[in-house]
Each structure stands twice: as structure tokens, then as C-alpha cells.
Amino acid sequence: MFVGYTRADWEAVGAKCARICRHVGFGPGDSLLNLLGGGLWVGGPCFDLLADVSGAALVNTGPTGPRQLFEWVPEMGITGLTATPSYLRLLVETAEAEGAALGSWPLRLGFLGGEGASPELRRQVCAAMPEQFVWQETYGSTEVGGAILGYSPPLEPFSGHLNAATDEFVIELLHPDRDEPVQPGDVGEVTVTTFREASPLVRYRTRDLAAAVDAPRDASGLPRMTAVVGRIDDALKVRGALVYPSSIEEVLVARLAAGAEWRIVLRRDRAALDVLTVSVEAADDRSAERLASDLHQRLLVRPVVEVVPVGTFERFPGKARRVLDERPED
Amino acid sequence: MFVGYTRADWEAVGAKCARICRHVGFGPGDSLLNLLGGGLWVGGPCFDLLADVSGAALVNTGPTGPRQLFEWVPEMGITGLTATPSYLRLLVETAEAEGAALGSWPLRLGFLGGEGASPELRRQVCAAMPEQFVWQETYGSTEVGGAILGYSPPLEPFSGHLNAATDEFVIELLHPDRDEPVQPGDVGEVTVTTFREASPLVRYRTRDLAAAVDAPRDASGLPRMTAVVGRIDDALKVRGALVYPSSIEEVLVARLAAGAEWRIVLRRDRAALDVLTVSVEAADDRSAERLASDLHQRLLVRPVVEVVPVGTFERFPGKARRVLDERPED
């Protein structure tokens, strides 16, 4: 599906970006390093536009290795950046490995999105960043026009909540298999209706899963939803149970060393039963039993936990891809 | 060197793009496929801006394999595209190999630049494109703000000339080693002076080589210069003589089959003499002797010509890199 925007549509996206910037406090005097590239999605152009309408300076390098940032961020006085959570994690890990100190950076805001990130991961990354740094989650998609569907309440970066832009979009949380809303508080598919001159959306199903949150509103006046807890495509059916990779992430990031990677492998054993193996990077295998039990409790499926040496797995400068489903297709 | 633009600077770039579009006839009703990506140069953003100020629709996919264009260009009614000459050559070659017909495409304008292209290469590429297609050379750089320093006279696409924007920039052709202009008609280094709020340029040396052309002006009223004939960094010193890879290209494209690739290799023999080897793709080696003699006449250096099977060398979706200098550093 191709998505188009007229000039008026794009200006409306800009107005939404400007509102977010006013609320999170980003504008004249700030410099945004936009690490999101162009291509068949709106990520890069949307944040170029955000800098433009906010009055901030823009350094739009597109995808760039973390080492370059050690030089650029202090030299150019970068105060905000855009990236995926995986990229920020890689940045922190690279800085630690090379003894680069990020604490004195002028960076104070990260516009982060494009994939989920557990509160635990956010806390670990923020601990390595300058004290004033705020994890500013943003949520949206190319179809809705950019990262303008929701953003984390700026004073509660670890809440795992989003302010949902329900005044600008009709946002519904529907059952994945029928056009009916889930019960308040239950996880449903984020579904968007919006007027536009080009490519209007009527009950556009994002494949993203989230739940409404009954919590006091902040200065934005917007109602809350959870950050995306998973994608419909992500859910793994393991021995009949639905397992979300994001739940595995949450347990692992809390237990493993900072920056440790993992992989989730699904196989079928000789008795035709699904086997869920979680391979984790760790210095020794003392934690394996504990991890297996924590994961079991969380997933309701008992995984095999395998320990591999730290540094075994590839790191992700973009979105993480950690699942290998090697089961034969039914 | 980092280059910055204020909002006013960037609007001035837009005004220059708009003037070029008015002259070459590109605007409302047109659709521009921008295949140039973002990153540490202005190519991608400059043509996004060009579409915006001209009133054309914009499809900014960034770098994309040629096969995708077989679907996109007809489906989306693309009338203009931006690319390097090497990319267009690869597109034509891929279309021929796969039997894709480009003749019925709506494409009528290619904004081409970023590297040189001989008149012969332009003719060959245009022969495979739709009849209405025009090779619209553009010239500029990140330092000057984009592809706004010159553009080929739209009615003379094979002239090898550029309309030089001398009303907006001070353009001098200087001796590479001193601040003095070359004789009219001689090749000199394109040197630019321009006012801007951020990053103004005073005798900025582009490293590009070109010559003034004494020819009647077209409707733009601008004086003419040649397209870039080479880069100072490109010139190869071979047994004391300066050899420009662009001169080799011109001879080879005229003699080889369409789409054939080549490499230029420099080695030092046991007598400490430079050996210039040109490896060319061809069906047989009957042409080798003739090529060597044509190249000798053009370069004043006699090369070794080696014939290799068609398809031996890698193709270039971006700028071509054909020179391997394997001589020991002195």
C-alpha cells in the first residue's frame, strides 16, 4: 500500500509535531540529530519536519554508526536525537566498551520509537545517558503520517504510557478478528480513522497491540494508552499459548548484564511438540535456571535457556530482529 | 567541514530550484521520484525541496534497486527522477537483460548529476529511454547548497554544456595551484563565492574541473561552461602525464557495447615505470588493439588493454568507482 500526503496533509502533520514539541519542551535553541533515514517510510522526513516547525536546528545525517556520535553530539551541541531503542542500546554499549563518557553530553531528549522497549530497558539506557536526558517515546506510522499518534507523558518517561492523540485521530482498540472494541484495559489492536485529502484512513488496522490506561491526564489533557506491547505479527504460538517477544525482553533486560543480547528460537521436537529456546549472552550459566523459571512464570510456557558468551550475537543499529522460527509450516 | 543553512538560506536554495524548474519545464502535474538518499550530503533534501517549490508531487524513496522502478514508474505516473548517471546506466542495462520495455514509461525528465557522463553515454542511455525523455544535467554540491550551480540547457541535452548560475554565485575558473583565472576556454578549478547567513563561501574550491564555453546563451540568459570534465583528485599521474578517467570513459563508451563495464588499473613494473591497464568487458578481443590505439591518441599515454567477459565487473547503483591505483606510495 502506497500512502500519499497533499501539501495540506503534510502541513497538518507539521501542526501535530509542533504541538508535541510545545508539550515536551523542544524548540528554538535545540538541535535535533535525525538518525532515521528516508526510504519507504515516513520516519526520516517526519522528524525533519518536526525540527522545522519547532524552530530547532536540524542535522539530518540519516543512519550513522554510534562512534560518529561521540564526536558530533558534543561538537555540534546536539540536544535531541531520533533513533530506535535498539540503536540507543547499541550506542550505550559501544560507549561503555570504548570508555566514552556520555555524561557530559548536551543531549537532553531522545525521540524514540519504531519498536517497543520495556521500562527496564529504558531505565538502563537512561542510567548511562546525561542526567538531564529524557526518553521521549513517540508512536505512529507511515500510514497515519508519522510519529504523531501518541507520545509518552514527558514527566513520566518510565510509565510505559502514551498520551493518545484522540483529538486528532479516532483511535480504537479492537479485537484482532472482529470490528468490536476490547474491554477497557484489555489489549486490542490499535485501529485508526482519520480524514486526509490523500489516503484517508477508515478503521486502519495498525497490527500494533496496546491497552487503554485509566490514569490521571497530564497537561496535554489527552487520555492514556500503553506503549505498544507487541505486534499481531510478532505473537508466537507455542504449544497453543501466545508468547510475545516483548514479554521475554522485559524479563531478560531486568536480569542480564546491560547490553547483553539474546535470541528466541522455535523448533519442533521429535514428538511434534514446540520447543522454545532462549539463548542469552552471559559470563557464566549460573543464571540459566533462574531465568527459565522467571520466563516460565511470565509466559506460562517453559523455555529452554541456553547461555552463550557475551558478544556472540549481532547488534542492531535499526530495529531488533531476535526471533528465529524454524518450525515446519503446517 | 560541516555546512549549515539557516531557514533563509534554505529558502534561497528553494528559489534557485524553482527558477531551474521554470526553465526546464517541471512543475504541477509532474511526479518526481527522488532516488538520492539523505546522509552527509544535500542531494536528497535538495531534490525534495525542488519538488516542493515546483509544485510537483514527490516520491522520495531514496536509493532503490532498478527492478522496483519497473513497477513504480508506470504505476505512479513518475515523470521525473533524480539519480547518478551510473544508476541510469544500470537501470537501462537491467531493463535490457530482463526484457523490460521502458519506451512506454511516462518519464520525461532525468535530473542527473553527482558524477560526470560523456555525451556518448548520455546518447546511449537516452536511446533506451522513452522518446520524450530528456537528460537534464544538474550541477552543484553540498557546500553551495545543492544542485543549483548549473544545469544543462534544456534544449541541448547532449551539448555537454551547463548554464552557469553566475547571477547567483560568483563562479571563477582558477588555476588549481594559485588564485588566478585560467585563460578563457582552458580547464580550471570551479571556485565559488556566495553570501549566506550560515556557511558563506569565499573562493571555495570545489575540486571540480571545467572550462568556460563561448556559445550563444539560451532563454535563461546565463553564460555557459562545460559540464565537469574531471576532479582534481581524479587526475592520475602516469609517467608524468595527467590522465583523466573521464577521457577514458569517453573513448570506451563510444566503442564498447552498451552497458559494458571497465576498470582502470595502475601498477609499477620492474623497471619502476607506471603501467596503465584498462580492462574492458567485450565478447571477444578483436577490438583490443583498436581501443589501445584510440586511448593512446586521446591520453598521450599508451595503455595495456585487456578484454574480460561481459558481466565480469560489479555495477554501480551510486557513483562509479573504476580506478585501482596499486602503485606503491612514493
Image (cartoon, coloured by chain):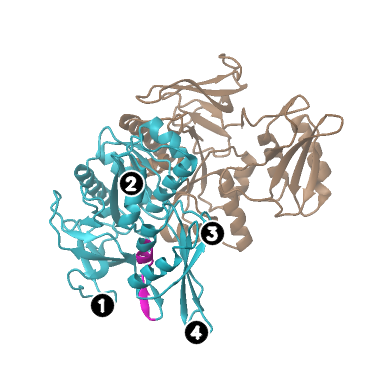
Chain colours: A brown, B cyan
- Going from the N terminus, do you reach mark 4 or mark 2 first? 2
The residue where tag 4 is placed is B272
Which residue is pictured at 62% across the width and 21% down the height? A186
Question: Which residue is label 2 attached to?
Answer: B126
**Distance CA(mark 4)–CA(mark 1):** 31 Å
**Measured along the vertical axis of the image, is residue A19 above or below residue A181?**
below
Q: Amino acid at mark 4?
A: Ala
Residue range (magenta): B240-249
Q: Quadrant of the N terminus of chain B?
A: bottom left
Amino acid type of the residue tagged 3 in the rendering: Arg
Which residue corresponds to mark 1? B178
Amino acid type, mark 2: Cys
**SS at badge 2:** helix
Q: Mark 3 against mark 2, which lies toward the viewer?
A: 2
Please say whether residue A31 is visible from this viewpoint: no
Q: Can marks 4 and 1 be said to lie on one chain?
A: yes
Task: Name the secondary structure under disc 1.
Answer: loop
* Residues flagged by tags 1 and 2 on a common chain: yes
Q: To which residue does mark 3 refer?
A: A67
Local packing at callout 1 (Cα closer than 10 Å; few below 14, some 14-19, many 20+) is few
Same chain under badges 3 and 2? The reply is: no
Distance between the alpha carbons at the discs numbered 3 and 1: 38 Å
